[in-house]
């Protein structure tokens, strides 16, 4: 991620929990807090936070997305560091706020949002977070983290430093999982086909866990895995890094 700031110990950090994490994957948020606090980062949770506007933005509802971007900016204005466990929501804040026509101040606050992996490696300067996870894992990078945030190999560097983990490369890792928010609703058969291909690639590695830093991808893939009965579980990156 193109941000050269370094986190200084004691600086306040705000946690942004996306809507679908709050509803479908709260353990990812809990693990993020546990991990950050273990690393000495004090985390606050602004109670007034709501959606970042990403679904509205992706569907073309720019005024509604802009209104949510402005609300996000008001809620997080007091924080220089804002961490989220979703690559797609971080991408919305960093790039989508400007595209939706939000004010300059909202765009500036959106630029303070980090996905978890980029914050750990780039701002906090750590790769070994003291985790132990004695299982075989393969990693899926969501499109927003890969193509908009350009988070690079930050998640893989973190996973390689986990004790007793077996990290297996995911074939065709650069391919989309097929979720894409509204895409999965409007083009459900194409979306499912892309997701099934992603799951097949993950299964071919022999990994026990398909891990990602984007819970929206995991939501899609987990549904397909459960439907097929395949011997594969999905897990957020934060849950692996929080394990000891």
Image (tube, rainbow, N blue to C red):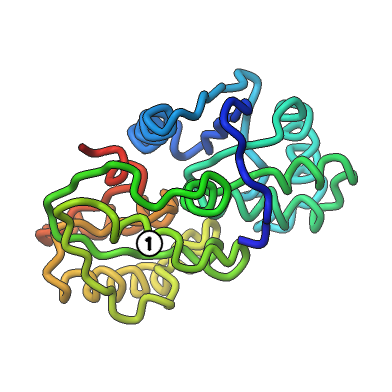
81 vs 103, left or right, is left
Q: How many marks?
A: 1
Q: Is residue 23 visible?
A: no
Q: For the point 13% across and 54% down, which residue is it? A: 135
> Residue at image x 56%, y 22%?
44
Nearest to the observer: residue 89 or residue 44: 44
Q: Is residue 175 above or below residue 104?
A: below
Expressed as whole percent of the image width and height from the top left, the position of residue 52 reads 65, 41
Considering the numbered disc 1 on the image, is that residue within a helix, a strand or a loop?
helix
The residue positioned farthest toward the right in the image shown: 104
Q: Residues within 10 Å of mark 1 (few under 14, many from 20)?
A: some
Relative depth, front residue between 21 and 122: 122
Residue 98 visible in the current orientation: yes
Q: Is residue 170 left or right of residue 141?
A: left
> Considering depth in this image, is 9 or 235 the residue closer to the camera?
9
Quadrant (top left/top right/bottom left/bottom right) for the N terminus: bottom right
- In the rendered image, which quarter contains the C terminus? top left
Residue drawn at (66%, 52%), measured in percent from left and top? 92
Left or right of 237? Residue 234 is left
Rendering quarter of residue 23 = top left
Task: Give x and y (percent) for residue 193.
Answer: 34, 74
| Residue with the mark numbered 1 | 157
Residue 156 percent across, percent down from the top left: 36, 63
The image position of residue 5, as x and y in percent, is 68, 49
């Amino acid at each position: 991620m193109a941000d050269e700031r370094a986190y200084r110990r004691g600086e306040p950090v705000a946690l942004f929990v996306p809507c679908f994490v709050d509803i479908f994957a709260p353990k990812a948020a809990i693990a993020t807090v546990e991990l950050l606090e273990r690393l000495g980062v004090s985390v606050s949770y602004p109670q007034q936070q709501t959606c970042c506007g990403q679904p509205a933005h992706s569907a073309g509802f720019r005024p509604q997305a802009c209104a949510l971007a402005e609300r996000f900016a008001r809620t997080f204005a007091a924080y220089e560091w804002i961490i989220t466990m979703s690559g797609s929501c971080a991408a919305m804040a960093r790039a989508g706020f400007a595209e939706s026509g939000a004010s300059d101040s909202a765009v500036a606050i959106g630029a303070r949002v980090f996905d978890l992996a980029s914050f750990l490696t780039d701002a906090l300067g750590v790769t070994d977070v003291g985790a132990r996870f004695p299982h075989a894992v393969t990693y899926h990078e969501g499109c927003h983290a890969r193509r908009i945030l350009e988070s690079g190999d930050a998640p893989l560097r973190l996973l390689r430093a986990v004790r007793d983990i077996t990290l297996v490369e995911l074939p065709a890792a650069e391919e989309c999982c097929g979720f894409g928010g509204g895409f999965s609703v409007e083009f459900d058969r194409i979306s499912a086909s892309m997701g099934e291909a992603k799951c097949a690639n993950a299964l071919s590695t022999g990994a026990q866990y398909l891990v990602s830093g984007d819970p929206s991808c995991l939501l899609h893939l987990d549904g397909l895995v459960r439907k097929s009965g395949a011997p594969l579980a999905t897990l957020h990156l934060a849950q692996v890094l929080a394990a000891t």
